[in-house]
């Protein structure tokens, strides 16, 4: 359509070619005047395509039609369609103009983009996408590298922990740093994790309710690692939480080092790391060895000190809540190298929140070991709203532990074989019902031999036991009272603690 209009316009212009004295031009449509025309304006030659054929037009353009001046409409070319040339000397429009080859072809998309543009349009975004992808991959790899580097740092060379974990520091140093600088509730968690992950397990040393206890090595020293199965995560968390109670640390409570939950992709390993005591539990110790009077007093006094500290509420910012153990027995007390006890296995402990006079977890009716359950626990008369009830139940169990110790006391060449409390009254692994019959109904207690009366220490121990075993929990001695009595005894017997 546009081409037609251009052609018609050009033909019409032929009629405008006027005869004059000014400029003479070639004129394709002027047969009558010998293909010439005259004008006061310009000669014009134009070449264009119409229906696939090249057409040439040469005409005169009058001055009146040379508008707008400078770039007259009739002299304009249209790229790829029309090549027009105006000139102002005689016959100057005899030139043969070529229509320039269209530079822009109509492509399959229906647009007028050339191959270069097409390539640019397609390749541009693809290139951009590649660049983004590469940047993404690079960032991901960088992040991965940084992450594994950090992991390695944490495991092998915890440089971020350098303040705490300088190569020459022993666990004792670490714990000392912590107790003098921190809140007194444990090592910072990242140090705990680093320590835990650099322990090399050596051998299994115990099996309990929730899993295995291992001896492990850390920086050449021994540590104990209690490994919980992932099903027991709550128990692991609870025990770690109790051990990290502010100001709990005491020489007669197992020294807690670290808790760690290590996810290896398929399962989670839950670790509690503590001081290692090569003698193992008091149960193991008494099974192996008899004890001297001095040894007995040491064991009994240290156990009472540990329990008194556990039970005691200390007020103030540097204080601690009262804690009841709820599973005190010879298997949950460890014997240290110096012959003193460390109370362990705090997994069932409860803490007293004195402001609200509540217990920090909902205590279930009967937990712990049936053989060591106090009468009020066995017959479920214990007042669980009252925190002191739990302390009294611990004291009953402590009395049984004292009986186990005192039986092994070698006085005047006599000592008895090791036995569990009530060994003569209930079968092994007794039921609650069997225990209740003996302890509540028959009101029986372990036998205190008469010959103990002949030895002041055994006499005192026997007296303490009986006062721990009252059916009425409130009438029992307190841990602090027992500690004082035994302290006095240790002075009298010249026991070096
Ligand atoms: N720190 C330790 N050092 C030496 N032996 C330990 C230590 N901790 C636990 N054991 C041994 O492992 C046994 C089970 O440990 P315990 O903490 O009572 O686990 P559970 O909660 O499974 O009863 C103990 O009776 C003792 O023989
Ligand atoms: Mg235990």
Image: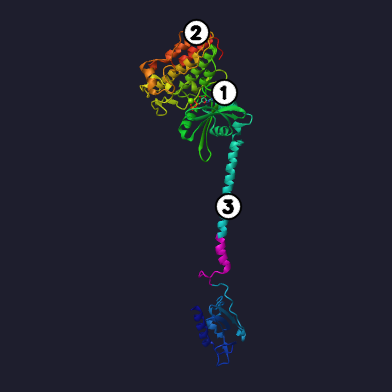
Element type at mark 3 = helix
Q: Are marks 1 and 3 in contact (CB under 8 Å)?
A: no
Task: Report the mark closest to the observer, 1 or 3.
Answer: 1
Residue matched to label 1? 278
Q: Quadrant of the C terminus?
A: top right
Residue matched to label 3? 135
For marks 1 and 3 on the same chain, the one whose residue lies earlier in the sequence? 3
Q: Residue furthest right?
A: 168
Q: Residue furthest bottom?
A: 32
Position of residue 268 measured from the top left corner of the image (x, y, whole percent): 51, 37
Query: Which quadrant of the structure image shows residue 389?
Result: top left
How crowded pointer 2 is (Cα within 10 Å; few <14, some 14-19, many 20+) is rated as some
For marks 1 and 2 on the same chain, the one whose residue lies earlier in the sequence? 1
Reply above or below: 162 against 386: below
Query: Residue at image x 57%, y 65%?
Result: 119
How crowded pointer 1 is (Cα within 10 Å; few <14, some 14-19, many 20+) is rated as some
Tag of residue 456: 2
Task: Report the mark closest to the observer, 3 or 2.
Answer: 2
Viewer-side residue, 163 vs 463? 463
């Amino acid at each position: 359509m546009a081409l037609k209009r251009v052609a018609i316009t050009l033909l019409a212009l032929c009629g405008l070619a006027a005869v004059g004295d000014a400029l003479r031009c070639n004129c394709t449509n002027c047969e009558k005047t010998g293909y010439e025309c005259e004008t006061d304006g310009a000669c014009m030659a134009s070449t264009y395509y119409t229906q696939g054929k090249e057409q040439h037009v040469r005409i005169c353009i009058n001055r009146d039609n040379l508008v707008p001046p400078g770039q007259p409409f009739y002299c304009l070319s249209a790229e790829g369609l029309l090549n027009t040339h105006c000139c102002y000397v005689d016959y100057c429009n005899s030139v043969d103009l070529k229509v320039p080859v269209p530079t822009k072809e109509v492509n399959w998309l229906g647009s007028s983009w050339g191959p270069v543009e097409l390539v640019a349009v397609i390749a541009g975004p693809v290139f951009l996408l590649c660049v983004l992808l590469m940047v993404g991959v690079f960032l991901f790899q960088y992040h991965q590298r940084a992450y594994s580097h950090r992991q390695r740092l944490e495991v092998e060379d915890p440089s971020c922990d350098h303040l705490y974990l300088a190569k020459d520091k022993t666990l004792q140093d670490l714990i000392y740093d912590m107790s003098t600088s921190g809140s007194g509730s444990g090592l910072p968690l990242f140090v705990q994790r680093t320590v835990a992950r650099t322990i090399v397990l050596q051998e299994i040393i115990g099996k309990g309710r929730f899993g295995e206890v291992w001896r492990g090595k850390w920086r050449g020293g021994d540590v104990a690692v209690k490994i919980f199965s992932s099903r027991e995560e709550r128990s692991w968390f609870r025990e770690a939480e109790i051990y990290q109670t502010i100001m709990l640390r005491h020489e007669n409570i197992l020294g807690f080092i670290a808790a760690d939950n290590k996810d290896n992709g398929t399962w989670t390993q839950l670790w509690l790391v503590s001081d290692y005591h090569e003698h193992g539990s008091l149960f193991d110790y008494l099974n192996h060895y008899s004890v001297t009077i001095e040894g007995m007093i040491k064991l009994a006094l240290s156990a009472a000190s540990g329990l008194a500290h556990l039970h005691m509420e200390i007020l103030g910012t540097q204080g601690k809540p009262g804690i009841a153990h709820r599973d005190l027995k010879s298997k949950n007390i460890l014997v240290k190298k110096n012959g003193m006890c460390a109370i362990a296995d705090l997994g069932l402990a409860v803490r007293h929140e004195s402001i609200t006079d509540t217990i920090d977890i909902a205590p279930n009716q009967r937990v712990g070991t049936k053989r060591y359950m106090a009468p009020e626990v066995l017959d479920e008369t214990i007042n669980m709203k009252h925190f002191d009830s739990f302390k009294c139940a611990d004291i009953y169990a402590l009395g049984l532990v004292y009986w186990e110790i005192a039986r092994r006391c070698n006085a005047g060449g006599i000592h008895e074989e090791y036995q569990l409390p009530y060994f003569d009254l209930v079968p092994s692994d007794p039921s609650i019902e069997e225990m209740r019959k003996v302890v509540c109904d028959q009101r029986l207690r372990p036998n205190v031999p008469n010959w103990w009366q002949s030895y002041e220490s055994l006499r005192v121990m026997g007296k303490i036991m009986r006062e721990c075993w009252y059916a009425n929990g409130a009438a029992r001695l307190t841990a602090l009272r027992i500690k004082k009595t035994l302290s006095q005894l240790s002075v009298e017997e010249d026991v070096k603690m």
